[in-house]
Each structure stands twice: as C-alpha cells, then as structure tokens.
Amino acid sequence: MTDLLEVRDLTVHFDTEAGLVEAVDGVTFNVRSGEILGVVGESGSGKSVTALALLRLIRPPGRIVQGAVRFEGTDLVGLSEDEMRAVRGTRIAMVFQSPRTALNPVLTVGRQISRLFELHQGASRAEGRTRTIGMLKLVGISEPERRARQYAHQLSGGMCQRVMIAMALATSPRLLLADEPTTGLDVSIAAQILELLRDLGRRTGASILLITHDLGVVAEVCDRVAVMHAGQIVEVGAVRAIFARPLHPYTQALVRSIPRIDRDVTMEPIPGMVPSLLAPPPGCRYADRCPRVLDVCRRDRPAPRAAAPDQEVACHAAEVEDAPARG
Amino acid sequence: MGFGRYVLQRLLLVIPTLFGVTLIAFTLTYLLPGNPALVKAGALATPEHVAEIERRMGLDRPVPVQYWRYVTGLLRGDLGESSSTGRPVLEDFRQRIPATLELTLASLIVAVAIGIPFGVLSAVHRDTVLDHLSRLLGVGGVAMPSFWTGLLLLYVFFYLLGVAPAPLGRIAADVTPPTRILGLYVVDALLTANGTALVSSLHHLMLPALTLGFAVMAPLTRMVRATMLEILESDYVTAAWAAGLPRRRVIYGDALRNALIPVITLLGVIFGFLMAGNVVVEMVFAWPGLGHYAVTSLMTKDPGPIQSFVLFVAVMYVLVNLGVDLLYGLADPRIRLR
Amino acid sequence: MRWRRLTRNRLSFGALCVILAVTLTSLLAPWVAPYDPDNPDAEATLASVSMRHPLGTDVYGRDQLSRVIHAGRIDLLVALCATAIALTLGSALGAGAGYRGGWVDQLVMRSVDAIMAFPAFILAMAITAALGNSIANVVAAIAITHVPIYTRLIRGEMLRVRETEYAEAARTVGNRPHQIVLYHLLPNCVPPLVVQATLAMGFAILTVAALSFIGLGIHPPQSEWGQMTAEGAGYVVSGEWWLVLFPGFAIMLTVLAFNLVGDTLRDLLDPRMRGVR
C-alpha cells in the first residue's frame, strides 16, 4: 500500500498568556491509502490539534512552527490559503467531536450539505438537494427528505453525527479526519457510527484518521494505530502487533487499562498526569510517569526506532531486538 | 405549535407590564405634589376655586376610580391638553411624531451601517489597529454625552467648515416642505420627486442623525464584536472552514448570521437610548419632534405633555421589546421550532 | 496577549487616577480653583483660552476653569448619593424578595419590571418634573431608575446560592435554609455589587448632566457640567468653542474613568462575566 498522507516532524505551538505551550511536538506518521489509522491518547495529548493542523486550521495564538504534511504528493504547509481551501472539504474532510455544536444552528442540515455540492462541484440548487437526500440515505438516515429540512437541535446526537459524516463524505474526499466521532453517544449508537465509518471508508476507498481516547474503538475498527502522549507519538504500528506486544511503557499501561471481560484482572489506571506542555523537560515526556525510567530518559528525547516489520517505538527502555535507529 | 405558544406567552406578559406602566405614569401625573388642579387654576386662585376644579377633574374621587378614568381616557386617545399650545396633546403629538420618527430611523441606519461592519471587522482582525480603534470608540462612545457630541459636530461642520446648515429644524427656511404623505421629509420628497426639499432635508438630517447614531453605535459594535469572537471560535465555524467554504461565506454567512441573533435583543436597549438621545439631540438642533415638545413644555411648567410623552415612550418601548422577542423567536430556529 | 493585559491594567490605573483627581479637586474646589466661580471679570468676557483664564471665560467673564472644578462637586455628589440610595434600597428589596418569596417576591419583581419598562433617562426626566425641579429630586429620580439593577442582582444571587451544593450540604447538617442563604450571600454578592455600582456611577453622571442640560435640577448661578454645556450651546455657532468643549470633556473623562474601572473590576471580581468584553 502507498502512503496517502505523510506527516514529518509536525510541531504546533500556542503562545498563551501563561507562556509557550508545545501542544504538538515533532509528530511523524503516515496514513496509507484505504486504511484506518487510529490516533489514541489521553485528552490534552495533542490529537485534535494534530488533526486541525493537517487542515491548517490552527487559529492564533497557535501556529505550525515546523514540519511537512505531504498529501497526495504536495506539501500542504507550503500551499497558499486559496490552494489550501481547495483541499479542505474536497480532498480532506473532517468529522467533529460534538456533532450538535459542529452543525450550524440556523441552517437546515440539508442546506449545510447541499451547499457543498454547489460550491465544490458546481451543482445547481435542485441537483444539490437531490444529492443531499442521496447522501443522507447513504449514511442511514430514514425519511431523508424530512430530515433535510430540519435543524440540528431537532435531531438526536447520533443523527447529527450521521449528518456530519454525510457532510464530510459529500464530495468524496480521499482522507477523512474523525475527531472522537462517538463522544457523548450511547454505546449502541456509537457502535453503529463506527460501523458506518468503516463501511463507508471501505466503499469509497477513503482513508480515515480516527482520533479516540479509547483503545477498544481502535481494536474494533482500525488497521494501524499511533499512540500519542503529551504532544508526541510514542509508538506506531499495526493494531494486532501493538495489542499483542506493546513496547512503550505508556502503550503497555493503556492496553492494561482496557476493561476486559475475558480476563479477570483489575483495570489499572495510568499513574500520574499528562505533563504540562508549558516548557516541558528536554528528555522523554513520559519519564515522570514511567515505571522503567532510566537516567538517559531525563536527558535525551528518545528517537523512534523500528521494532518489528510494522511497529515503531520511541523509548530508551523498550527492548528492541533487531532494528537500527531511524533519524 | 411551539412557536405559537411562545408568541402567546410574550403577548400575555405585555399586559401586566402595561398595567405597571400606566400605574407609574398615573402616579406621576396625579398623585405627586404638583397638583394638576393647582397648576390649572393658577397661583392666584382661591381655595374654593381649586376645590371646584378638583371636583370637575374628578380629583376628589377615590384613587382607583381616578385611575380607571385615566386609563379609559387614554384608550379614547385623551392625553389631556397642553396649556402652552392650547391644543389637545394628542394633536400636538401627531404633528411631531414624524420628525422624531425620521430622526430615529436615520440614526438607526447610521448606527447599523457603521456599527455592525465595524464590530465584525474588529472581531475578525482581533488585536490589530482597527480593533483597538473600534474598542476606543466603543468605550468613548458610551461615555460621551450626546448633546456634547452634537455641539462639537456643529462647531466643526457648521462654524469651521461651513458644510452643515444652522441647527434650526428639519429643512431650510426658504424651502417649502414636501407634500405630506408620511410626514418623513426625506421619504415624502423622494415620493414626490421634490429634489430641492430632498437635498435640504437630508442636509438638515445629517448632523442630528450622526450624533444620535454615534451614541447608539457603541453598544452595537461591542456586542457584535463579542458575539463574533465567540462564534468564530465555535465548532460549526471550524467545521465550515474545514469544509472548504470561502472566507467571506464563513464570516458573513455562517458566523454573522448567528451573531446577529443576540444583536436583536439589543434593539430594545437601543430604542431606549434613541428615545433618551432624541430629547437632548432635538434640543441641540431645534428639531421639532416629541422630545423638543416635551422639554419646551417642561420649561413653561406645563406637565401634561411631559407625562404623555413619557407614557408614549414607555408604551412604544414595551411594544418594541415585544417585537424584539418575537423577532428573536423567528430568527432563531431553536426557539421557532421547539 | 500579555501586552494587552499590561495596557489594560495601565489604562485602568490611569482611570483610577482620573477618578481620584476629579474627586480631590471637587472636594478641595475652593482652594484649588484659581478664581471665585461666580465672580465676573469685566475686562475679559467671552475670552478664549489664555494664561489668565486657562479654559477661557463665559459671557459674564466668569472663569471657566473655576466653574468646571466647582461644577464637578454637584455631578459627583448627585451620582454618589443616587448610587448609594439605589444600592441600599435595591439590595434590601432584592434580599427581601428572594428571602420571603411568594407574593412579596411577585410584588417586588413586578414593580421592578414596571420601572424597567421605561427607558431610564425618560423616567428620570418624568420623576424630576413631577416631584419638582430640584437637585434632591434629581437624586431621587436617578436612584429610582437604578433600583432594579441591584434588586435583580441580589435576588438572582440568592436564588442561585439556594441551589448550590454547599447550601445543600449545610441543609443536610441541619442549618435552616434562610441562614444558609444569608450567610453565603454576602461574600457572593459584594463583588458584583461593586462592579455594578461603579458602572452605575458613570451612567448616573451622564443622566445628571443630560437632565440639567434640558434645564432640570440645577438653578443658576450654581454650575454643573451639563448645565454649563447648555449655557455654552448658543455660542458654538458663533465660534466660542471653549464654553462647550471643557465641561463636556469633564463629563466624558469622568464617565469613561468609571466605566473603565468598572470593566476592569468585573474582569477581576466577577469571574462569570470574564471574557464577555
């Protein structure tokens, strides 16, 4: 499989009143065509900021300090605002965390979708309306004609999220960024939404970057997973490999904290808190919470190392058998 | 059905408010020391004469009866008589309402046309020179007494530059007012294609409208800026950016459309400001409207017109606020379609 | 961001200094003012700005600077008295309404609604006209129009405190709800009251000035900023600008200072309102 998206050394800072917050720090990963990549981490670990940075939607006081985002061969960071706008919505689309607030309260949901057809594909108003109905049907909304005329506050949370997904997929993007798309939804509705995402991804061939704090979700729908901690990616790899043999102490803690029915082990919460991203220490950002911390961890930032054919880890203490360090 | 109930609720709320308003106006007119019989009888009247007038005016009756007569009188359009013009107050009102209406509307146009774009730009270009300027005008605008603004404008544009007319009413003395249709000179002049009257009335309207418009612009700009800032950070605006909508469309379509809904609630406050400002600004520019009439009768110690003016303004204020509530309901689907 | 916070504080510090300076010069007016405010200088009538008369003189040759300084006493005193009365009366009514509930609450709140159904300035104008044209009545009029601010604030705060968790907690320990409300009310109410009173001072000064501009409250030769502006109004069309500029500027500066300090206090004391402006 080829890479649809290649993110290299992406760094985002926020210049707040309290000081410089290094929200995303040298993040490197890729998304392959047609795959679902999970990005997992605690809240405040920089997952959402990363997604917004990919679309260059970081607002002041935040800014992309450095890094490259190669998408279909072009570096998005170097594009002009107009060129970037042409990418948004058409090539890369996004589904937001709280569907109800992400829909405009004074426009009917149908209008919010149909205007994208008009804008991006030059459809007429009537044409846009027809395609909107088709889109709503596709995401499993019953009575699409009636729903299209309604406003966000008249729909249930799950239905709003389906609308958001319809909106995001309206102009068949190649990459879909889904930021915690199941937050606040019932477990059964959440499962349906995830199922829908996976299904639509397969059918359209779009890649999905799925942000979540729930490894259970990752296990269910993702092909690969990137684990984020305090603005950095600490481990990337195939879901099966990472669940079978998590290498980073943080990943190990995350995996242990998944509630499981088949094992009679008490769930272990991860000790400590996400470290402050205001002037973080020079070494590994997990050092203070890490049970296997070494001297070197507090001094040098660990570089990502290939650990297995499809697994990379950034940890001094991890036991990596065969691979040389990668720069 | 949800909206129907909402409308009904608002309409029902108006009744106790109007009751309170007329009660206060009644108290001010009849129960306070400035006994209307005394005023009417004059300083030299004998106690018997005063008592006679009191009886004729019904002032010896129990208070609730007096109040009832007062309210029923109001409903018949009886606002009393003006002792300075010697005519029914209602008639004087009819003659002067268009002047006040014209000034109020023109000021509102000035305030909206300058205030809203300024608020939007200030929010979009946050912390730039433009933003600082707009905020300076915002705090300065509410602190400047409008009579002072008016007089300063007069000094600059009439005395120094000579581009504004003398502050003597709505139209030049040597220009015949346009044929009366609505009573608004600018509109009437347009409708009758009367170029001379149009130019002259616009010329005279310019400074008063600017003065009053400036006075109400500040709260408008402040509110638009604050709500725009909030909305520009909202999820749905981020979603609109992420969907690749063009900048103008996001700012003036998605964001402003939402920002204007809370601004509707400000219209009531603005109307109150405009009415208060009218009194003072009409005095500065000798604008022959209701405020001017009320103050003139104040100077001649003729309380009737003032009390009627206050009542009139209060009733208008209640109705404007009702309209604001209904408009708010219409503009926000979250209320309209509960 | 940091720069803005800094300028904001510097600005409010300046505003505070303005308030202090205006208060001091008003208090010490007889000693600070260069001339007797009512004493005409026959050689300099309608004199423009000069070394002798820094703010010029009026049609009788009275020194404008001295008059502006003396006039400030009335503006500040009226605004202060009106605010103090409204604060006391309004808080008492709000506390009573929130404490008793029931018909007392209904009566107080409907009366407050009726007062608020009038634009404040128009009502103040009517009250002054009805009570009689004097300074005391201007104070009363402004106080009445400001009562609703405090009544609503205190009542709202009381109802809010009643619902909070610590009231709930105190209740379970056996304290009576009324005690709890009163005990927790004061610390919660003082900050917003201070904020509102500061902002109301600015509005009160504007109201006094506008009322006396249209001839209510002040009787010459007494001077007040709005009334001075009114006296100077006729001279603007003949170019004697100083008669209008300085008293009006005094109003603006003082009101601006109160508003800025009020805004800053709101940011500091009332975290719920933070970021609204």
Image: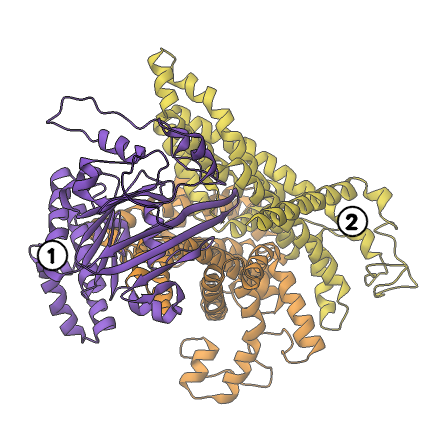
Chain colours: A purple, B orange, C yellow
A302 displayed left or right of C220: left
Q: Is residue A118 left or right of residue B18?
A: left
Residue C205 visible within the image: no
Q: Quadrant of residue C28?
A: top right
Closest to the observer, A179 or C176: A179
Residue A218, compared with residue B166, is above or below; it is: above
B143 horizontally vs B240: left or right: right
Q: What SS does tag 1 mark?
A: helix
Label 2: how many Cα within 10 Å (few below 14, some 14–19, many 20+): many
> Please, what is the three-letter code of the amino acid marked with disc 2?
Ile
Which residue is denoted by mark 2 in the rendering? C69
Q: Which of B305 and B230 is in front in this view?
A: B230
Using the image as rendered, state which of residue B61 and residue A15 is in the foreground: A15
Q: Which numbered dot is residue A202?
A: 1
- Please say if C96 is above or below B155: above
Which is in the foreground here, disc 2 or disc 1?
A: 1
Q: Position of residue A8 (x, y in %)?
A: 36, 55
